[in-house]
Amino acid sequence: MRHKPETQDTFTPRQRAVLDKALGLLMEGGERALTTAGLARAANCSKESLYKWFGDRDGLLAAMIAHQASKVRARIDSGERLDLDRFRAHLVDFANDLLQVLGGDVSLALNRLAIGQASREGSRLGALLIERGRHGIDKRAGALLEAGRQRGLISYNDRDSAYHTLYGLIVRDLHVRMLLGEAGVRRPEHYAALAEEAVDRFFVLFGARENETTRADRL
Amino acid sequence: MRHKPETQDTFTPRQRAVLDKALGLLMEGGERALTTAGLARAANCSKESLYKWFGDRDGLLAAMIAHQASKVRARIDSGERLDLDRFRAHLVDFANDLLQVLGGDVSLALNRLAIGQASREGSRLGALLIERGRHGIDKRAGALLEAGRQRGLISYNDRDSAYHTLYGLIVRDLHVRMLLGEAGVRRPEHYAALAEEAVDRFFVLFGARENETTRADRL
DNA sequence: TATGGATCGTACCGTACGGTACGGTTCTGT
DNA sequence: ACAGAACCGTACCGTACGGTACGATCCATA
């Protein structure tokens, strides 16, 4: 039956193109705009193929999440030596990337989709989104924090608590407000300043040495 | 036509009962479970009345938000004199209330509803939810912070920035994860500890005097 | 060239929902 | 007691969607 080596968790190029079209429809018009007939028409494929490839509509949604997650594989931070400035720059990069990702069209559309389905009983979309999307981010940040701690640049007792605090300092209430579609919240041109401010405050809370440098003016 | 004094922005008791039933349906089964026929059946009213009262389905959803918001009117903090301990206690109360509200069944259901509709073009639900729900919280916190600043208990340049930082320290990524339905995130028994920790960190960032009291052990 | 699998386009089916219409009933004001 | 409004329960309509079926077409392989 299957002598081909594990083509199970990946998709054919054709299927990837269809999934991209599906993401496009979802971004434009939300879940209501993502109908099987509409996707078949937009992607020039047949509904029968959709059901053959993804099982049913829920399978399609799950495949969309898996597909999108496979595209934004977390880059691995190079193992270069860490001094304080470099560590801080990495944190600011992380903050910028986090805001960029959370505020992206695809991320917002998928999160809206998963949240809208979260009330339904057997919906695994939320878990899928966290598992495939958030865990990569969490790992990257966790490794970064751990490296900083081992270098003596920051100190904490509970790494998870420190990480979630950093997350809160960066994201604040922006994510939910963007998800709600509040006007004037998505301002990518402000992300850099928000990232700097968040990292400054993170160092005030978790910096290993109380170095009162150029920080006071920013706060 | 209307000699009754402004019964416009409120609802009759019957309508309130129907709206409560609607909230119940929404909490149980999500948006898909909130159908006009289902609501009419559950609330023992006719579909015709629903459309007469609320116009259409979107009007019903908006009315649900307005109704729920009218129930949780923000209590006014008593104007008693503020010392540091009392101020801190008020902040912890605020943090606890915030976590309690955001993690409540009704709030989660309404936020999921508004987020699910956010992609549709003419949807005002998100704005309504922010306007009717969040602004009250924001005002309460803003007044509290301002009082603390005027008493010299904290200091900041930008009140909004300080407030959003406090919000981020309290909520972290909990809200979105609860909205996604992640298992094991809703732990009301942990709210108190989270609130204390958040307020501690807030004082580290914005406390007026660097009083290194009993804080170091908590961080 | 023949053959079989994969895919496309279209048509079809059952269902469920939003919204409307209508007759019967209860409530209210005079 | 009576009139009118509000309301209930039910039936009805049009539409749109998820899912299936089927003939036609493309394409790889022998």
Image (cartoon, coloured by chain):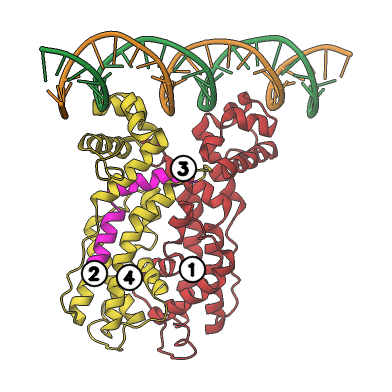
Chain colours: A red, B yellow, C orange, D green
**Label 4 is placed on what type of residue?**
Gly
**Label 3 is placed on what type of residue?**
Gln
Find residue A143 and name its label.
Answer: 1
Name the residue carrying label 3. B117
Q: Label 4 vs label 3: CA separation?
A: 29 Å
Kindly identify the residue that appears in the image at 36 percent across and 66 percent down.
B167
Screen quadrant of the N terminus of chain B: top left
Q: Label 3 vs label 1: CA separation?
A: 37 Å
The percent coordinates of residue A40 (x first, y second) are 64, 29
Quadrant in the picture for residue A187: bottom right
Residue A115 shows up from this direction: yes
The percent coordinates of residue A106 (x first, y second) are 57, 50
Q: Which numbered disc, 1 or 4, marks the residue closer to the eye? A: 4
Q: Label 2 vs label 4: CA separation?
A: 14 Å
Q: Give the magenta-colored segment's residue range.
A: B92-118
**Label 1 is placed on what type of residue?**
Ala
Q: Label 1 vs label 4: CA separation?
A: 36 Å
Where B69 falls versus B64 (above or below)?
below
**Mark 3 or mark 2: whose residue is earlier in sequence:** 2
Q: Which numbered disc, 3 or 1, marks the residue closer to the eye? A: 3
Please identify the dominant SS of the magenta region.
helix
Do the residues under discs 1 and 2 have CB atoms within 8 angstroms? no
Name the residue carrying label 4. B142
Judged left or right of residue D15, residue A4 is right
- To the question of a shared chain for discs 1 and 2, the answer is no
Name the residue carrying label 2. B92
Q: Label 1 vs label 2: CA separation?
A: 32 Å
At label 4, counting other C-alpha atoms closer than 10 Å, the crowd grade (few under 14, some 14-19, many 20 or more) is some
In the rendered structure, does residue B199 fall within the stretch colored magenta? Answer: no
Disc 4 chain ID:
B
